[in-house]
Image: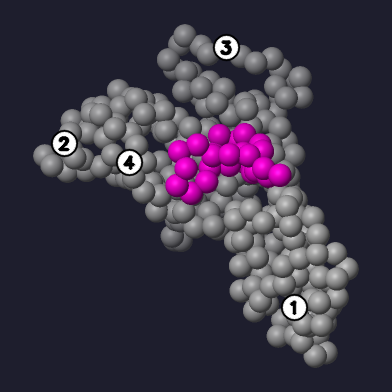
Amino acid sequence: AGFPFGGAVAFGAMSAHIPDGGDTLMVYGPHVGVDSKGNIGTVERRGKENGGSCCGSAVAASGYVADVLSGATEKAAIPDDPLHAQQAYVSDMLLPYAERLDTADNKMQELPYALYDAQQDMVGRIIEKAAAGVAGDGKIAVLGGVQINTPAGFSDYFLPLSFELYNNSGDLVEDFMSSTNRPFNKVKEIFPGALSNAELVAKVGQTLEANGYDKKTTLVATSLCCDEVNRPLEDAFSGDYDTNFNMGGLAGFPFGGAVAFGAMSAHIPDGGDTLMVYGPHVGVDSKGNIGTVERRGKENGGSCCGS
């Protein structure tokens, strides 16, 4: 299923093979098949009339964690026999994501994301433990994502989910995918139905356009907390609707009230409409803690929303 079972020992051995004065690139992630009919979790295989599970290990593990969650089976111990140890570990490391998979709209689509999250944690621990094995000023580039397998005759794909650069002290030097549209799958587990900013803006735009809204004559009014972490959503809406009228205050309350709404109404383009976006905000940090988030340039994050 893509777990780096060689662990810190394998990373150390690899580090000893890096050319003198060189660096390393580590690529990791689970894989998932998509067959010629668009089914997820299976793919046609060379010389076989019928395809099969893809990834077979992941699909088997997902069945196990579903049975543990439902009470149909008890959590199994890791076996002493190495013939079955890897599959047992895959199943065990997928267990924390059992409820997330159970509530997913499409379990086979969510499964590789859950595996990626589990593997990302393991890769982070390996780098923390073994980065010092990279000699000199050597750097460690780590690309993580989901490999997507397709039928014979078609190209396979790779969905990048993280791309980071570390030094040989294990410190993060640069995040190459610090885009606001980078998926953060922990949010899906904690807040089912949540949309990324880009997804939200696209969906709202399509819905309003179907109901007669014209982006050229629509004014967006937002009531979002004055915390700077909320500006990207305003920027995303402004990208579609040109500008934004800010009605918000602490914690997202529309403290401008009826007076601000009246002023905003007077700014709506002739013959146009308005879209009002409001609500509180909450942070989820990189470890999945709710009510806090890492902030730019600060070693420690902080409450979110602080108000």
34 to 21, vertically: above or below? below
Q: Which residue is mark 1?
A: 219
Main SS class of the magenta portion in the image: loop
Number of other residues with Cα within 10 Å of mark 3, as a class: few under 14, some 14 to 19, many 20 or more:
few
Query: Taking 147 as reference, is 218 left or right?
Result: right
Tell me which numbered mark, 3 or 1, is placed earlier along the sequence: 3
- For the image, the number of numbered tags is 4
Find disc 4 in the rendering and name its residue. 166
Q: Mark 3 is on which residue type?
A: Ala
Q: Nearer the viewer, mark 3 or mark 1?
A: 1
Q: Quadrant of residue 241 in the image?
A: bottom right
Q: Which residue is mark 3?
A: 77
Residue assigned mark 2: 136
Q: Can I make out residue 214 in this image?
A: no
Q: Earlier in the sequence, mark 4 or mark 1?
A: 4
> Crowding at label 1, few (<14), some or many (≥20) Cα neighbours within 10 Å?
many
Residue extending farthest to the top is 80
**Which colouring convention does the figure follow?**
one colour
**SS class of the residue under badge 4?**
strand
Give the mark nearer the N terminus: 3 vs 2.
Answer: 3
Q: Which residues are magenta?
A: 283-307
